[in-house]
Image (tube, rainbow, N blue to C red):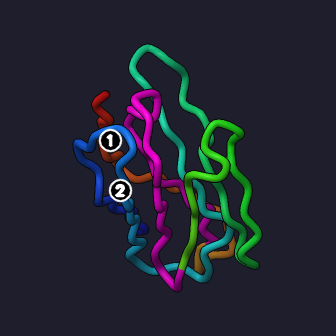
Amino acid sequence: QVQLVESGGGLVQAGGSLRLSCAVSGSFFRINDMRWYRQAPGKQRELAASITRGDTTNYADSVKGRFTISRDKRTVYLQMNSLKPEDTADYYCNAEISTIWGTISDSWGQGTQVTVSS
């Protein structure tokens, strides 16, 4: 069974930085696209950043130039700089996993909270 575990959230002042990590564990054939979503209080979950297996990245306009997504073999990272109060949200890791049985699994982490104070 595949598990995604996030870490790195916390409280930071506006203008500060945080680095989120999401480690994938378990048995699988391959990790395909990996993504970071976020959900602010009272709002819908939105895609913040994504990275393909070939390291092509894509960002929401609201985080472009401030956030950087990267990955290694089993972990995806989100470096968040110049944080703003509007970045306050629960951040969720998502990965498309090719299983050893030939199916595709859409896997989610439990979320990590980021709070940016003004």
Label 1: how many residues lie within 10 Å, few (<14), some (14-19) or many (20+)? many
Q: Is residue 101 above or below residue 64?
A: below
Q: Answer with the quarter of the image where residue 41 lies.
A: top left
Secondary structure beneath dot 1 equals strand
Q: Mark 2 = which residue?
A: 18
Instruction: Residue type at mark 2: give it.
Output: Leu
The residue tagged 1 is 114
Q: Amino acid at mark 1?
A: Val
Q: Quadrant of residue 21?
A: bottom left
Q: Which residue, as the protein is rendered here, is positioned at the far left?
A: 11
Quarter of the image where the N terminus is located = bottom left
Specify the segment rendered in magenta: 72-98
**Residue drawn at the location 60% of the way across and 74% of the way down:** 31
The quadrant of the picture occupied by the C terminus is: top left
Looking at marks 1 and 2 on the same chain, the residue that comes earlier in the sequence is marked by 2
**Which is more toward the observer, 107 or 40?**
40
- Magenta-span inclusion, residue 75: yes
